[in-house]
Each structure stands twice: as structure tokens, then as C-alpha cells.
Image (spheres, helix red, strand yellow):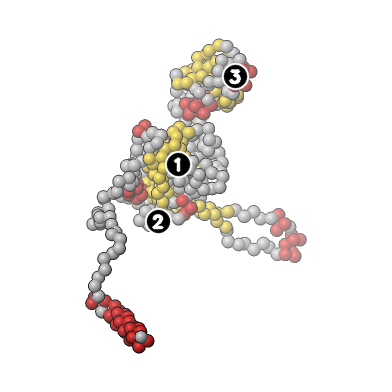
Amino acid sequence: MQRLWLIFAQTVTVALAVLFVVSTLKPEWLPQRQALVALEEAPSNNGDDKVAPAGSYREAAQTALPSVVHIYTTQEIKQQRHPLFDDPIFRHFFGDKPEGQPQRNSGLGSGVIVSANGYILTNFHVIDGADDIQVALNDSKTYKATVVGSDPESDLAILQIKADKLPAITFGRIDNLRVGDVVLAIGNPFGVGQTVTMGIVSALGRSHLGINTFENFIQTDAAINPGNSGGALVDVHGNLVGINSAIYSRSGGSLGIGFAIPVSSARNIMEQIIRNGTVTRGWIGVEAQEITPELAESFGLPDSEGALIAGVVRGGPADAAGIRPGDVLLSVGGKPVKDPQAMLDLVAALTPGENTGFRLRRDKSILEVQVKTGKRPASARPEKE
């Protein structure tokens, strides 16, 4: 029995050795085993990138991406000389202060090509104070940019580069945009490179945010981060519907609340800057205040509609028309005034030099006055976070 067991063990060992040698040197001699699990693969599109899968926004991204640029800015930091270095005794012992290399700050943002001959739309705060502005296109070509003009109160600026036949973006129609529509935000967040994020329109006509003087924002939950400023917000066809401008965040990153300037406002301001080099707005010279329920009760007003005139510039258009502090502005040119922001927008839309009817409440009387609109003086944009 022991001898039989030994022969069996030797036979098995030799068989395993032969199997190992054959499987290593001549695996084709062995029968092929079928896979235990049948794997299915998606059919190939044969290199046809135009065939987008269902639910993809590939075509919109491919349409808009070439029109979005990266903007790099540098700004020299002015170093103040300490007064001690001007003291003769101090200089006798310690010598003159050595002149070092000037320090420079760098910044980044995004922009949108709006014409084939080199005009680029971006945010004012992206290029504010910059000594040098460089624009990198989607094909990695870089150009030096000049500032055509800017409008701090709406946070918009127009740049121009010396290039032609550029891929200008197509402007969309803001009146077709609705809450719930899908939008894509394109820009250069944190300088990582061109990025596309997706979201929906969360709200329209957002104001009273304290971001700009004139506010009428599109709110979106598409991820907008530092570096996206000045980039494009596009619809599902790749058409421009807004210029990404700001985020609501305490950490500096996206929290799903981003704001974009509507393309209608941006286009109007852009055309004025290109045509005239500046933006012209109406002005009447008043300071307005919101009517709270407490103020309404104090002044004996029937409701809180309108804007309370808190101050009047002496010699200004409102002063010349007889408007006084304490009056309540109810309408401008027949359009109702709901609050001070609405008043600011309505007055800004007036043409300087023209007479416009203003409806006021003074004490318990309703007055109609004609105001000759003046030109709004330039003012600095409120500081952003």
C-alpha cells in the first residue's frame, strides 16, 4: 500500500510539472475556458464626438469654451519709506536704505470674447488697479490687453487685444431665461485651468446684496469660485446669458449661491463703453431711504411703498424741481417706485437733459413735478468681500 501511494504521489507531481511547463511555454495547447461572467460594453461611436449621450451638455460646452479666456494681472505694491531714513544722524550711523526690487501682486480671473476683432468683457474688480493685463486664449496663445473702459458701479470692464478672427460668443436672450433652467458656468477657478460646472437658475432679479451699486443678478447654484469672475454663464445651447460676478461665501469657496450679471445689462453697458468710452446714467441728486413699517407709522403713511427722500443735493435737479427731504417718491415717468433700489435703477435709465414726471407724496397730498435729469457723476464701486 505504501508503494502504491508513493507511485501516485510521483505521478501527480510529474503531471503538475508538465502542466506548468505547457501553460508557460505553449498555453495555446490547453483548452480555452469561457469567462464566468458575460461583460457588456457600450458601442463605440467610431470617433464621432458629435454624438452626445442623452443628458449631456457637451455641445453647449464645446460651443462656448473657445470664447472664454483667462485673465492674469499684476500690480506693483508701493513701498513707503520710513521717516527715520531721512534723518541725517540715523543715516550717518546706519547708511541709506538699500533700494530693493519693487514687490508685485498678481491676480487672475476670466473674460468672454464678445467680438471677433478682440473685445473682451470681464468684471471691473478683475482688472482694478492692474499695471499689466495678459489674456490667454483657449488655444494657449497669450496677448497683452488694454482697458477700453470700465463701469465700477456695475462691476464691468471692456478689454481689447490685438487679434482678429477670434471665436466670439453668441449672446442669448435674457427674457427667455426662467428659474429652473439649466446653465453652465465657465471660467478659471483657483487658476487650475478652464473648467465647466453645471447648475440651474435659482432666482432672477436679485438685488439689495450690497455687491454693486446697480444690481439685477441671476442667482445660480452652478459652482462659481475665485477665478471664475468675469467668465461666462451660458444656456444649454452655449449662448451667453450672464457674466459670473460674485459668490456668497464665508470660506472663499462655492456654497451653491453664485451671482451673474444678466447679458442684457452687460450688453447695454458694453456698447456704451465701446461707443463713448464711458457709461452715462441719469441723476437727480437725492439720497433715498427704505420705508420701514416704523417709518410709515411715524410719517403717517398708508403703506411702505415708495422711497423716502432723506436728503437733497443743493442746486441739483431735484432741488430745482422743488423736491424736499421727507417727500416720498412714488413713481418715475409713470413707473412705480417700490424701494430705493428701484428708484436708483429708474433714475439711472433716464436720459440726461430730458424732463421727466415724478409723482410724490408730501404730508397727505400727492404732487406731480417735472424734473430735468442731470448726468450721474462717476463714483467708486463698493468694496467686495
Q: Nearer the viewer, mark 1 or mark 2?
A: 1
Residue hosting label 3: 296
- Tell me which amino acid carries mark 1: Asp
Q: Nearer the viewer, residue 130 or 363?
A: 363
Question: Where residue 303 sits: x, y (%)?
Answer: 55, 18
Q: Are marks 1 and 2 in contact (CB under 8 Å)?
A: no
Pick the quarter of the image with the N terminus.
bottom left
Q: Secondary structure at mark 2?
A: strand
Marks 1 and 2, how far apart at CA:
31 Å
Q: Is residue 66 above or below residue 95?
A: above
Residue hosting label 2: 142
Q: Is residue 315 above or below residue 19?
A: above
Q: Nearer the viewer, residue 345 or 21?
A: 21
State the count of labels.
3
Q: Is residue 198 left or right of residue 287?
A: left
Write the residue at 55% across / 11% down: 365
Instruction: Name which of mark 1 and mark 2 comes first in the sequence.
Output: 2
- Tell me which amino acid carries mark 3: Ala
Instruction: Name which of mark 3 and mark 2 comes first in the sequence.
Output: 2
Q: Nearer the viewer, mark 3 or mark 1?
A: 1
Pick the quarter of the image with the C terminus.
top right
Question: Where residue 20 sits: x, y (%)?
Answer: 31, 80
Residue hosting label 1: 221
Q: Are marks 3 and 1 in contact (CB under 8 Å)?
A: no
Write the residue at 69% across / 55% down: 82
Q: Residues within 10 Å of mark 2 (few under 14, many from 20)?
A: some
Does the rendering let one see residue 128? Answer: yes
- Residue farthest toward the bottom in the current orientation of the protein: 3
Instruction: Name which of mark 3 and mark 1 comes first in the sequence.
Output: 1
| Quarter of the image where one finds residue 143 | bottom left
Question: Where residue 195 sits: x, y (%)?
Answer: 41, 51
Q: Secondary structure at mark 1?
A: loop
